[in-house]
Image: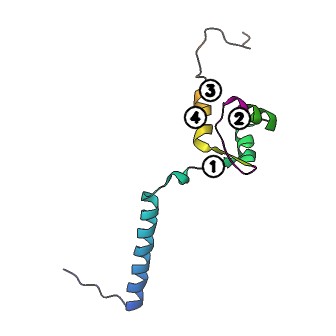
């Protein structure tokens, strides 16, 4: 068995790095519900590429769930993802080729 000797300063630095790793691991393993990403109106408008009026209609008709804190409106990123998945239209193969000229 080999024995390695390190200086006291290097040992302290190593301990600090280990503590930092432990803290990061603890933080990652203890994800709370608030770790869900919340998006404001402007972020959702950019993602969906829609107008404010359309987003208001989505809220009014229940297409997208939201949370309101005072005058500020927030949307869950997972709800936006769910909206995309629910409106996904898979590609289909057709015998007719549109716009193809022989």
Taking the image as shown, residue 95 lies to the left or right of residue 40, namely left
Indicate which disc, 1 or 4, sits on the residue closer to the N terminus: 1
Real-space CA distance between mark 4 and mark 2, rounded to the nearest whole angstrom? 15 Å
Q: Which residue is mark 3?
A: 87
The numbered dot on residue 38 is: 1
Query: Of 8 and 24, which appears nearest the observer?
Result: 24
Real-space CA distance between mark 2 and mark 1, rounded to the nearest whole angstrom? 15 Å
Where residue 3 sits in the image (x, y, percent)? 24, 84
Q: Residues within 10 Å of mark 1 (few under 14, many from 20)?
A: some
Q: Secondary structure at mark 1?
A: strand
Where residue 36 sits in the image (x, y, percent)? 56, 49
Q: Which residue is mark 4?
A: 82
Q: Which residue is mark 2?
A: 59
Query: Residue most toward the front?
Result: 70
Indicate which disc, 3 or 1, sits on the residue closer to the N terminus: 1
Taking the image as shown, residue 25 lies to the left or right of residue 35, namely left
């Amino acid at each position: 068995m080999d024995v390695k000797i390190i200086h006291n300063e290097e040992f302290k630095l190593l301990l600090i790095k280990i503590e930092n790793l432990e803290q990061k691991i603890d933080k990652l393993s203890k994800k709370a519900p608030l770790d869900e990403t919340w998006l404001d109106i402007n972020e959702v408008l950019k993602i969906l590429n829609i107008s404010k009026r359309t987003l208001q209609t989505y809220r009014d008709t229940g297409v997208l769930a939201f949370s309101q804190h005072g005058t500020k409106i927030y949307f869950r990123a997972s709800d936006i993802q769910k909206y995309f998945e629910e409106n996904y239209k898979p590609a289909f193969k057709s015998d007719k080729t549109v716009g193809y000229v022989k």
